Image (cartoon, rainbow, N blue to C red):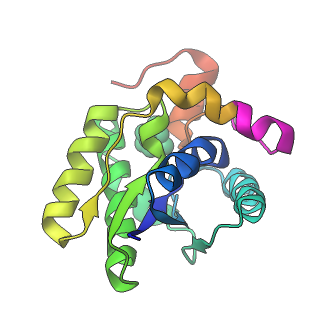
Amino acid sequence: MKSVLLHACCAHCAAYTINHWREQGYNISAFWYNPNIHPYTEHEQRLEAMKALTNQSKMPLIVSEGYEIIDYFRQVVGHEDQRCRHCFRMRLSRTARVALERHFDAFTTTLLISPHQKHDLIREIGAAIAGETGVEFLYADLRKRYSDSRHLTKPLDLYRQQYCGCVYSEWERYTNTKIE
Ligand code: SF4
């Protein structure tokens, strides 16, 4: 059975994604690395929800040490209109690196279930990182199952976020602003 390291952005996107890849016959472990989630207390709330989900799903969860918010801003400041590209690359590169170090056969991400994310960009960056690292990137378009995933987590009563993650997305969410 192939082992897969699943980058998890949040419990609500992870729930169906875990089931999907398990049904395809993969042995899944989750990986938490999200320095794009601001502020820190929000990051911790989402991580606690992820821990509750993985306990309930009896699935290993690897949590990256630290909170690399400074690295995130060093990548993004001055390129705010391109911030998602830097954000995806940062998170997926780390996932692939950990997958390589820990001898996983492949990596993927829960971001592929969200209709709110730049799906084609995630696919492009995942494939590029696979080429650079030699670790396979598992791709599936799961966007039609986004609401199913939220139904799965509803009975667990987990913390549910109101914006993507970064301070820019929070500002956009509450003011109808669009950063260009
Ligand atoms: S909007 Fe979301 S994906 Fe884009 S940079 Fe912010 S946290 Fe990352």
Give percent across and percent down for residue 6: 47, 60
Q: Quadrant of the C terminus?
A: top left
Residue drawn at (35%, 50%) of the image: 88
Residue 129 lies, in percent from the top left, at: 21, 60
Left/right of residue 29 with respect to residue 137 in the rendered view: right
| Residue located farthest toward the left when viewing the structure as drawn | 131
Residue at 36% across / 62% down in the picture? 107
Based on the picture, tell me whether residue 178 belongs to the magenta stretch. no
Name the residue at 26% across, 52% down: 126
Q: Nearer the viewer, residue 102 or 180?
A: 102
Toward the top, the furthest residue is 176
Q: Which residue is more in the foreground, 35 or 33?
A: 33
Q: Is residue 178 above or below residue 101?
A: above
Number of numbered discs on residues: 0
Indicate which quadrant contains ligand 1.
top left
> Is residue 110 in view?
yes
In the depicted view, which residue is nearer to us: 29 or 21?
21
Q: Residues in magenta?
A: 151-161
Q: Quadrant of the N terminus?
A: bottom left
Q: Is residue 131 left or right of residue 34?
A: left
Q: Going by the image, does 5 lie left or right of 161?
A: left
Report the residue at 69% width, 38% height from top.
161
Where is 21 relative to 68, above or below? above
Q: x and y percent of residue 142 in the render?
A: 44, 34
Q: Quadrant of residue 137?
A: bottom left
Residue 76, percent from left and from top? 35, 49
Residue 160 in sight from this viewpoint = no
